[in-house]
Image (tube, helix red, strand yellow):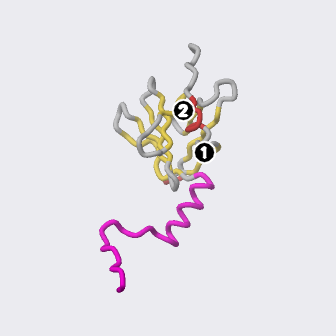
Amino acid sequence: MAAEAALSPAELAIAERVHVGRIACELGAYVTLKADPASPGHFDVEGKGFKYRMAPVATSTGAVRLEDQKGGAVWLQIANKSMLMDQKRGQRLADECMSPEQNLVAESLKKNPPPSVFEPLPVAKK
């Protein structure tokens, strides 16, 4: 394997937010993310039938995004779930993946859902 390019400080900051370990997904699937101590900011992402080498990519939304440009895969992580996509085939390989931290956020959102963007704002009383 060719030497990997060093990551920028912004990319390394994104890497610090990646949930690692065996993460349960829908339909009994799982994805395992392992940080590479020899190559800071890089991750090995694998599960049934796939294995990718990923690095962080900055997003405009603040979501954590890891990419394997060669393999065409993308890992997206938001507060309450993650998913793995195969961009070459246009398919989701794993969906509704939740680390223990994401599970807590998802449960909190069930109990205290945010207001709908379609509901009218409350009128101030005079």
Checking the image for residue 65, the label placed there is none
Which element type, helix, strand or loop, lies under badge 2?
helix
Where does the image place residue 36, in percent across and percent down from the top left? 65, 29
Where does the image place residue 83, in percent across and percent down from the top left? 47, 46
What residue sits right under mark 2 in the picture? 11
Q: Residue at x 58, y 21 (%)?
A: 6
| Residue sitting nearer the eye, 111 or 126 | 126
Q: Quadrant of the N terminus?
A: top right
Instruction: Identify whether 105 is placed above or below 11.
Output: below
What residue sits right under mark 1 in the picture? 19
Which quadrant would residue 38 be assigned to in this image? top right
| Residue sitting nearer the eye, 49 or 31 | 31
Three-letter amino acid code at the position of disc 1: His
Instruction: Identify whether 31 is placed above or below 102.
Output: above
Which element type, helix, strand or loop, lies under badge 1?
loop
Q: Is residue 55 magenta?
A: no
Q: Quadrant of the C terminus?
A: bottom left
| Residue at the extreme top | 2
Instruction: Identify whether 79 is placed above or below 35.
Output: below
Three-letter amino acid code at the position of disc 2: Glu
Q: Residue at x 52, y 72 (%)?
A: 111
The magenta stretch spans which residues?
A: 99-126
| Residue sitting nearer the eye, 121 or 25 | 121
